[in-house]
Image (cartoon, coloured by chain):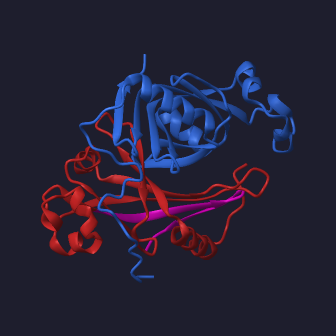
Chain colours: A blue, B red
Amino acid sequence: MSEDTTKKTVGRSEVVGRKKDTFLTKEEAISQALEMLESARHFLVGTNAEDGFPNIKTMSNRGRHEGLKTIWFHTDASSHRVQQLKRDNRACVYCLDTKLSRGVMLVGTMEILHDLDSKRMIWQEGERKYYPMGVEDPEYSVLRFTAIRAGVVDAMANKGLTFEIE
Amino acid sequence: MSGNVLTEQEAIRQSLKLVEKSGFCLLGTIADDGSPNIKGMYNVKHEGLKKIWFSTNTSSRRVQQLRKDDRACVYFVAAGRPGKGQSKGLMLSGTVEILQDIESRKMLWSEGARIYYPLGVMDPDYCVLCFKARTGNFYHKLQNAIFDIR
């Protein structure tokens, strides 16, 4: 397995790289980030594992968010992810659009919710095959991500912006 | 839904297949404030599941972060289309070494890279990241397997 797998590279491996000194306006950055949040089918969610190493997992976009500040996800109460977040609630949500060469990373914290209102908000009837008790199944849980900071990169324009989220 | 257990051999075989066909992957690192960070990176060179190389600017924030904390993960994903089977994913956990020796520099260098590094292959702002995996976690459908990388 040590064969040479080098593919053509242009010197920087970042899929959406940019110069450090050219910026998007905050309005442009927010609007690009919102577009991606709405169109993405999946997000990549980063957490800190028990051993202190970063972890990444795909989580599906339930189409539930409030601006860039709050995003709701579905998970299982017994999942490894929930155990990690109980220990360390810091997380990031990343979204990459390879066609438009844009990327957004939101950094913040993740809360585990078990209340029925939150569960109802993201419940999809097709999930009954996995949760025989339906939306009230104790295994069906909700994660609420709250962002404190956003980083947006528009590689085609060679611009980006990092900003705080109020 | 903790899932069934794949055999280690089968998980490694499928992991290699996923890495071979992935055009890009996600690099997870730890920021100065301790929060996890993710960046999309082209999958340019790898040695089995053991090592993955990237090139970037030495002055980048990512490199500054990795100097302080070399713990990282590299994630490969083949997302399933809705109703067409479920996604496959591989997360490799390990550490990143920042390399600036001539051999490593030449390994990923191409002349087109001069637009980023005007001084060429020896430009001090050019560096190579070598991710070394320790463990792998492969999942497909509701099955998953965690294995050591040797």
Quarter where residue B112 is shown: bottom left
Within the image, what quadrant is residue A113 found in? top right
Q: Position of residue B114 (x, y in %)?
A: 21, 62
- Name the residue located 69 percent from the left edge and 51 percent from the top edge: B2
Residue interval drawn in magenta: B129-150
Residue A35 locus on image (x, y percent) = 56, 32
Q: Is residue A56 above or below residue A147?
A: below
Looking at the image, residue B7 sits to the left or right of residue B47; the answer is right
In magenta segment, residue A149:
no
The main secondary structure of the magenta stretch is: strand
* Residue B138 drawn in magenta: yes
Note whether residue A49 is visible.
Answer: no
**Placement of A94 over or under B23, stated as above or below:** above
Q: Position of residue B10 (x, y in %)?
A: 63, 74
Q: Quadrant of residue A162?
A: top left
Number of marks in the image? 0
Side of B144 relative to B16 (left or right): right
Asked whether, in this view, residue B9 is left or right of residue B57, the answer is right
Q: Is residue B131 above or below residue A19?
A: below
Identify the image quadrant of the N terminus of chain A. bottom left
